[in-house]
Image (cartoon, helix red, strand yellow):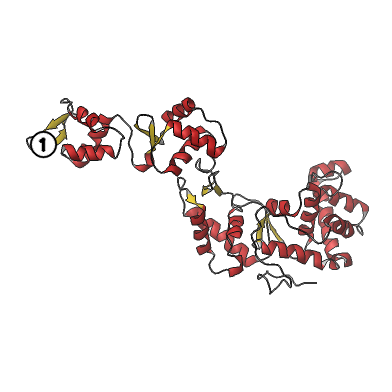
Amino acid sequence: MIERRGARCRGTLWHSNYQINEYTGVMITLTFKPKAITKQLIAPLPERVQEVLTMRYGLGKVTTPATLEAIGKQYGITRERVRQIENYGIATIRKSDVFAAQDAVFTELAEHIDSHGAIVPEEEFLAKVAKDTATRNHVHFLLVVGHLFEKHKEDDEFKHRWHVNKEVADAVHSALRTMYANISDDDLIPESEMISAFLKEVEHLNECYKNEEVVKRWLALSKKIGKNPLGEWGRAHSPNVRAKGMRDYAYLVIKRHGSPMHFREVAQAITELFKRKAHEATCHNELIKDARFVLVGRGLYALKEWGYSNGVVKDVIVDIIKQNGPMTREDIIDAVRKERYVKDNTILVNLQDNDIFIKNRDGLYSVREDM
């Protein structure tokens, strides 16, 4: 039997030809049949124990795992008694000669987990092992009884996950917490930057794990960090990541564009990027209602976070002069053009409002004191 200890990448614990590769979209090919192995493992158990494990893990014709309560009702026993039977069955399997004879099976599974980064999201890993639920259930059962695997249950921070290396698992958990703490609700980080930042957090780990696909798999463990449809990362609860409607999609589109966009362009981009039909009139109405957007020209919208302020051109002029003091006409035009996409004449016409603006002998404009 292989001694249980952390996998140290290819060539230390695992005596195989496995190595870290990019596995995106690629199924894992097992050299054994999971259903046959689980059948051998539970065969020596008492009948009721076999039945409880079969129902509990979806190993039979019914592939939906049963709850402790459901099994207890079927046998007329308490949930705690069902749990005791389950634990007894697993402990008995681990002590059996049949279990000892399956070292190669557990080692192969451990190699696959190690080659995926040593700690993997349960759902994603099982999805790569098999397309059908039944086979996934049998592999899951092998992980449960196996001696090389450690499960972390889902919590507020992370999804269900399995690891074969405690050092890597601890480092990944710590890095994910640090990454979350270092970003704000409004941040959107390009994937390449997110990966680079994460790699700095785990730079002490073996180089064999420092692979782009492995890092993305590690990031996917977090429930607090997420990726939006445009491949940008941020806090999972932020509307910038969890886009739910037209306004959120519009925000992502304009932010991605990097400069003001006409509402017709925004609607078209939403349709193309998110495969959601966006009607121009509806898009325009949503942009008007959301404080994240500022109308800076005829149908042109910018993001307020870029420094644009709400209000008509006259309001913008007032704010600029109040912030900077008396200004020349040319300086006012330059400053307003940074806030609004308007013609110079439009700015000059507004400056002629003597009820608001005063022009002194030096040609400098100021705002009347009562404004």
Q: Residue furthest left?
A: 361
Give the camera-side residue of 97 and 249. 249
Q: Position of residue 243 (x, y in %)?
A: 53, 39
Q: Is residue 20 left or right of residue 371?
A: right
Q: Position of residue 315 (x, y in %)?
A: 26, 31
Quadrant location, the N terminus? bottom right
Which quadrant of the figure has residue 333? top left
Q: Is residue 299 left or right of residue 18?
A: left
> Could you tell me which residue is drawn at 77 percent across and 72 percent down?
2
Quadrant location, the C terminus? top left
Q: Position of residue 25 (x, y in %)?
A: 67, 52
Identify the residue position indicated by label 1 in the image: 363
Q: Residues within 10 Å of mark 1 (few under 14, many from 20)?
A: few
Which quadrant of the figure has residue 289? top left
> Could you tell me which residue is drawn at 47 percent across and 36 percent down?
250
> Could you tell me which residue is drawn at 85 percent across and 61 percent down?
93
Q: Is residue 347 left or right of residue 165?
A: left
Q: Position of residue 228 (x, y in %)?
A: 54, 45
Give the camera-side residue of 322 and 347. 347
**As drawn, 216 above or below 3:** above
> Could you tell me which residue is drawn at 46 percent across and 38 percent down?
251
Three-letter code, disc 1: Gly
